[in-house]
């Protein structure tokens, strides 16, 4: 996912998905303003915007892009682990821009992000994109992380979790940092 003689560009979406255990659409639908390298956080939030961008194979396109999360409860801000920060600190972000980082990864017929990009993971990396989420959640469970902390980080509900308690649980970014470091191992 990083630079090599064969790979000319870092796959930042893959790295974000790998080190945060987020869904493919969450990683591929990020805007420049969603990644704060100074505060070392990533915000996953829904948005809509009419965007003009250059198409991959030439020409320009203007369309309304919609970023939906799986549910309204999926909106969150998570810390960037030290390992992920080292990998994305050179990411070409436009400060203050609310434009999507990868607008060409949007699929308008179902308002999804990254399906084509992530379908290539099997050939590029030897695993389907959802395995990155499975890996992160499994690492958290195996490390004995509280189901409520897992919910806060990846929005994956564990059977037996109380919906009421889940919604009252309000950890700080510092509280979540430990869990993000477990995923990075």
Image: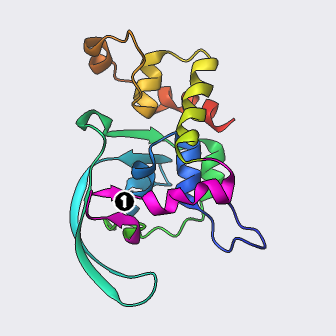
- Look at the image and give the residue range highlighted in magenta: 104-127
Residue 142 visible to the viewer: yes
Q: Residues within 10 Å of mark 1 (few under 14, many from 20)?
A: some
In the depicted structure, whether residue 51 falls above or below residue 17 = below
Residue 62 is a magenta residue: no
Kindly identify the residue that appears in the image at 66 percent across and 53 percent down.
Answer: 86
Kindly identify the residue that appears in the image at 44 percent across and 44 percent down.
Answer: 23
The one of 148 and 85 positioned closer to us in this rendering: 148
Q: Quadrant of residue 181?
A: top right
Residue 49, given in percent of the width and then of the height, sits at 21, 66
Kindly identify the residue that appears in the image at 69 percent across and 61 percent down.
Answer: 2
Q: Helix, strand, or loop for circle 1?
A: helix
In the depicted structure, whether residue 169 falls above or below residue 117 = above
Residue 180, given in percent of the width and then of the height, sits at 56, 34
Q: Is residue 147 left or right of residue 108?
A: right
- Which residue is denoted by mark 1 in the rendering? 33
Residue 172 visible to the viewer: no
Residue 125, given in percent of the width and then of the height, sits at 67, 54
């Amino acid at each position: 996912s990083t630079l090599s003689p064969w790979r000319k560009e870092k796959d930042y979406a893959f790295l974000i998905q790998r080190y945060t255990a987020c869904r493919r659409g969450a990683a591929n639908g990020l805007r420049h303003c969603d990644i704060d390298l100074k505060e070392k956080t990533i915000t996953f939030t829904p948005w809509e915007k009419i965007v003009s961008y250059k198409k991959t194979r030439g020409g320009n396109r203007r369309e309304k892009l919609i970023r939906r999360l799986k549910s309204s409860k999926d909106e969150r801000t998570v810390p960037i682990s030290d390992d992920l920060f080292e990998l994305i600190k050179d990411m070409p972000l436009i400060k203050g821009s609310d434009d999507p980082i990868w607008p060409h990864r949007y699929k308008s017929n179902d308002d999804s992000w990254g399906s084509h990009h992530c379908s290539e993971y099997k050939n590029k990396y030897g695993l389907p994109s959802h395995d990155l989420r499975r890996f992160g959640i499994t690492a958290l469970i195996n490390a004995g992380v509280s189901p409520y902390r897992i919910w806060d980080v990846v929005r994956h509900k564990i059977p037996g979790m109380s919906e009421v308690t889940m919604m009252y649980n309000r950890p700080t970014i510092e509280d979540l940092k430990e869990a993000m470091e477990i995923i990075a191992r």
